[in-house]
């Protein structure tokens, strides 16, 4: 059967970043099913460069504690540099997203203490029962990062279609040493981001906001 665009659009439109989770872990078979779906992702010469470690309880708590300690005391040192600067229109998109998120959490713009707590929630993996950490072999160069972005998009669609919830987190890649120590990534791998995974806490205020999108003509040009 050929899948229809309506179904695909429904899944893509329903996906959102979830930043508060229920404590119950996801059965291993359901996790494996969404990673199996994402495995269909295309990649440069079919190199399939995503390298992923998925934690389950109690391992998730061990990594969570180590990340919080690192975030409180360590200087960020990501393997792949984070953006330093956001020229327009990216700065406006970034600000709108931050204000909406803090607004949903009831945090005032000048409330530094609560903003710090909200930032720290990243390292607490938003209390998710699972953390997937994604890495790439740096010898493959920048195109492998595109492959991994494609894979992430497909994984998030599969997560949504399976009734699960996720938040991608580049934040945790600020402390790759901790992730190497606990998750056994080998030296040739650059750590790129994490994905908090679990069941959405639908009652949480944090999960009530949705980001918006520019119309396609902001991003796509058709030339006849
Ligand atoms: C590669 C990547 C890294 C991200 N890192 C973080 C992060 O560290 N913390 C966070 O709260 N959200 C993070 N996000 C989620 C984005 O903020 C979110 O996708 C964006 O605001 C759009 O909102 P939506 O996912 O709800 O549609 C990340 C998303 C991507 C794709």
Image (tube, rainbow, N blue to C red):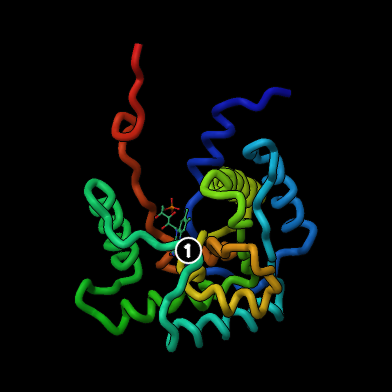
- The residue lying toward the viewer, choosing from 143 and 26, is 143
- The residue lying toward the viewer, choosing from 130 and 175, is 175
Residue at screen point 39% across, 75% down: 119
Residue 29 in view in this figure: yes
Q: Where 133 falls versus 149 (above or below)?
A: below
Residue at screen point 63% across, 39% down: 43
91 relative to 2 in the view: left or right: left
For mark 1, what is the residue? 170
Figure quadrant of residue 59: bottom right
Identity of the residue furthest to the front in this view: 139
Residue 85, horizontal then vertical, whole percent = 27, 59
Mark 1 residue CB less than 8 A from any atom of ligand 1:
yes
183 relative to 125 in the view: left or right: right
Residue 32, horizontal then vertical, whole percent = 76, 55
Residue 105, horizontal then vertical, whole percent = 35, 70
Residue 169, horizontal then vertical, whole percent = 49, 63
Assign the N terminus to one quadrant of the image: top right
Assign the C terminus to one quadrant of the image: top left
Figure quadrant of residue 197: bottom right
SS of the residue under disc 1: loop
- The residue lying toward the viewer, choosing from 204 and 184, is 184
Residue at screen point 31% across, 77% down: 115
- The residue lying toward the viewer, choosing from 116 and 108, is 116
Within the displayed image, which quadrant is ligand 1 positioned in? bottom left
Identity of the residue furthest to the left in this view: 110
Residue at screen point 67% across, 57% down: 51
132 relative to 10 in the view: left or right: right
Identity of the residue furthest to the top in this view: 224
Residue 157 in view in this figure: no
């Amino acid at each position: 059967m050929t899948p229809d665009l309506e179904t695909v659009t429904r899944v893509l439109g329903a996906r959102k970043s979830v930043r508060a989770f229920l404590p119950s872990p996801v059965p291993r078979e359901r996790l494996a099913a969404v990673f199996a779906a994402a495995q269909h992702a295309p990649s440069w010469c079919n190199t399939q460069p995503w390298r992923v470690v998925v934690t389950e309880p109690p391992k998730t708590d061990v990594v969570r504690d180590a990340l919080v300690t690192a975030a409180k005391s360590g200087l960020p040192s990501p393997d792949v540099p984070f953006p330093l600067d956001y020229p327009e229109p990216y700065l406006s998109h970034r600000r709108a997203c931050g204000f909406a998120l803090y607004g949903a959490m009831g945090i005032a713009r000048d409330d530094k203490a609560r903003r710090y707590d909200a930032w720290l929630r990243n390292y607490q993996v938003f209390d998710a029962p699972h953390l997937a950490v994604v890495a790439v072999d740096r010898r493959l160069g920048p195109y492998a990062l595109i492959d991994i972005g494609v894979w992430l998009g497909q994984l998030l669609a599969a997560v949504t279609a399976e009734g699960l919830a996720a938040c991608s987190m580049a934040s945790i890649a600020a402390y790759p040493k901790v992730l190497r120590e606990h998750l056994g990534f080998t030296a040739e791998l650059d750590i790129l981001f994490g994905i908090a995974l679990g069941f959405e806490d639908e009652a949480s205020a944090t999960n009530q906001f949705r980001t918006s999108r520019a119309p396609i003509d902001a991003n796509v040009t058709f030339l006849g």
